[in-house]
Amino acid sequence: MSNLLDIENLSVRFPTRSGTFEAVRGISLSLGKERLGIVGESGSGKSMTGRAILGLIRKPGEVTADRLEMQGESLLTASPKRMRAIRGKHISMIMQDPKYSLNPVMTVGDQIIEALRTHEKVNKAQARARALEMLDAVAIREPERVMKLYPHEVSGGMGQRIMIAMMLIPNPEILIADEPTSALDVSVQLQVLEIMDRLVRERGMGLIFISHDLNLVAGFCDRVAVMYAGRIVEVCEAGKLHEAKHPYTLGLLNSVPDLERPRPRLEALTRDPAWREAPSVSAML
Amino acid sequence: MSQTEIQIEGLEVFFGDGHERTRVVHGIDLSVAQGESYGLVGESGSGKSTVLRALVGLVPDWHGAMRVGGESLQRLGRSKEFYRRVQMVFQDPYASLHPRQTVDRVLSETLALHGIRDGVDARIDRLLEQVGLGGGFRFRYPHQLSGGQRQRVAIARALALDPKVMLFDEPTSALDVSVQAEILNLLSDLRSEFGLTYLMVSHDLGVIGHMCDRVAVMQTGEIVETLEVDAMRKLQAEHPYTRHLLDSALRSSGHAGMAEVQRTAG
Amino acid sequence: MTSNSNTSTKPGLKAWLLSDTPQSRGQARAAAWYQGWLKLTSNKLTSLGLIVLTLLVLAALFAPMLATDNPFAQDLGARLQPPGWEGHIFGTDSLGRDIYSRLLYGARISIYIVLLVALVAPLLGLIIGTTAGYFGGWVDTVLMRVTDIFLAFPRLILALAFVAALGAGIENAVLAISLTAWPPYARIARAETLTIRNSDFIHAIRLQGAGPLRIITKHIWPLCISSLVIRVTLDMAGIILTAAGLGFLGLGAQPPSPEWGAMISEGRKYILDYWWVATIPGLAIFAISLAFNLIGDGLRDVLDPKEAGK
């Protein structure tokens, strides 16, 4: 089976006054037609990994890899023009807060139509029909009415569903979702995740789900890679999370207060400096 | 049950003025006993933080009656005694510390405001010790601290005046889970050490379940249900909204709790 | 994760200043200043501005030693001589006075104007702006409408009116410029206060029982001052030019004072035949204005509160 993404020895560096900061330190992973979760705490390099794939690391940041390929095509050597075509058409990204990802002075409908027309030659009427269809697919009740709204007129949950519609309408093969629901309430969170999950499965896409919430990721992914200090410390099947061995993964699982199983004290994570230096675990298929 | 520390009766809170004056809290009643840890749960826009803000005098436009430790509260403005008794910790530790002030300055100002001049140095050192920060942090600026360390400083600031009541507005929602665990443990320790009364606002049922004895569930400015935390853990909720929240929380933490919730409800 | 590549010559002092765990109030403050200084001087253009400004201050301080002639001594036999003539580096003016010496003494007047305006106008703006922003309501309305009235007049015209009313002279020019310069600072300070007022750290200090006076002066001012300082340095060029403009119109410094604007004014009659008389003080004003602008840009990078969290 050919993979959608192949990444070997990916590093992301930023120069600072006191030396170089390595946000991602040589990770390897591949993505098939599956849902891969990348989990870690702030500063673990999980978001930088997603951005590096899309070529969104700005100067003076530096991305290096032995291999960074989308279906055999190198993303490291692709021209800026080609990268722009790839973003959206082949790989889409959903960010944390829809408020900052939607253009505040354009109606929702215009934005979705534009997203489609940048990547496909369709006439306005067709684009409109497809946009309505897409809004319907993300469970928006009155798509006709919502098309005419401006981003500030929609709620957070609806905004994120609109983002999903916008990102999925050019039919990309890969979706990168970076904390797509952290800004949302729990009940809305689940609804958005279910919609995203259903569409990704129906369309046979690859999903990279970046989150700090291990339990959430485990419920929505096939495989989970746990990142710590720019490296992958453990990879496991989502269903077998309870068999995880790495003390960091266990620490993350145990530090969450559990509604049904109360404990007098939560387990605080003691960070072993050795975790930082241990070689990165490969998440290749 | 022991004495009542916080008593709220028929609290209504309004935002905006003129035509745009809207009611965001619709007459809630709440009472927290001395030494109790009370949770206020709800989603964004439910008005849960507004209740805390009205209590400490940050929201001017409210009706109803509020009493803390027997003292009846005015519409705006609180006495110095009130602030010695009640302190608050805010949600975002990146926003609740003055960016240009060292930890030392933050803590010494609080003491100075209440006329504490003797042994300030020793007192600051002890405060930092109590929240698990060493003396090495005393002269740092907020940008030299991590999120968890900042929240510890905010807790130290709240503790500086030996309060009886601590109010928490989503104290850990901006932090990583491992740091959240450390802060929640610290809060548990402080409560048992000083016999504090807690009123905590959160959207996270797990956190509330861990920290609190009793819970009020808020939806669009009203308390829809009040229940003991044990009942909540056993998923014995009456109101459909509470059940919905419980169900969402369980499902997003990977439990197949849906059927269970419905069974207990039925 | 980070590799340190600091090559310090004085490890003791530098390490003390760059320490992440300062041991005293003084060290924390010194370290903050030092890091700001490092950031400021890492910008080459800003360093250039600082050098020019330092030269100006030195020139003003040591004017009696550096001057080759008495700036007021007339020599009608040697009037309008070109630069380089008989020891007059920048030539002489219409009364035969040495332009170089007059420039040096003129630097004193420029610094005097700049310092006074830079103290009075932003302070006035700060007080009015933060008071309006913090209290809101009718206080805000009244103060801001007054500000708007001042803003509605062109600055030079208003300054002219003030000077005309107060009488010509350097002190009155300073006063007039300050009175016309404060409204933009009040606007900036108010805008900053509006955002700061509702931040959690201000709520927090209110919950410690602090009163409005303390909150405004100790907690809001320090955060407004940085944007005001930036704006003042960027405006400094305009202030010098307004002063020069008043001088040029004969309403600022009075002859025979070697104020730069007045010097240009005197030279304008001869601009076609004896260009240096007006050009050289003009170049001096240009250099100083540029220096202040460069410093202002650098300060913005260092002081911008939005950058402070990084």
Image (cartoon, grey):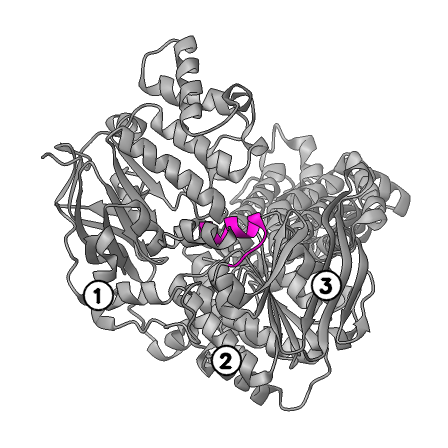
Dividing the picture into quadrants, the one containing residue A25 is bottom left
Residue C4 visible at all? no
Q: Name the residue under label 3.
A: B55
Q: Measure the alpha-carbon separation of dots 3 and 2.
A: 25 Å
Q: Name the residue under label 1.
A: A246
Tag 2 subunit: B
> Which residue is at a point 53% across and 85% down the rendered structure image?
B125
Q: Where is residue B39 in the image (x, y as percent from the top left)?
A: 59, 64
Whether discs 2 and 1 lie on one chain: the answer is: no
Tag 1 subunit: A
Report the magenta residues as a range.
B236-248
Which quarter of the rendered picture does the C terminus of chain C lie within? bottom left
**Disc 2 secondary structure class:** helix
Q: Position of residue C64 (x, y in %)?
A: 62, 63
Dividing the picture into quadrants, the one containing residue B255 is bottom left
| In-image side of A75 versus A113 (left or right) | left
Q: Residues within 10 Å of mark 3 (few under 14, many from 20)?
A: many
Q: How crowded is mark 2: few (under 14 residues within 10 Å), some or many (20 or more)?
A: some
Q: Where is residue C277 in the image (x, y as percent from the top left)?
A: 62, 39
| In-image side of A156 versus C149 (left or right) | left
**Disc 1 secondary structure class:** loop
Magenta stretch, overall SS? helix
Total tally of numbered discs in the picture: 3
Whether discs 1 and 3 lie on one chain: the answer is: no
Residue A69 visible at all? yes
> Which residue is at a point 45% across and 54% down the rendered structure image?
C47
Q: Where is residue C132 in the image (x, y as percent from the top left)?
A: 78, 51
Q: What residue type is labelled 3?
A: Leu
Q: Compared with residue A167, is residue C231 higher up or lower down, i.e. above or below?
A: below
| Cβ–Cβ under 8 Å for marks 1 and 3 | no
Q: Mark 2 points at which residue?
A: B189
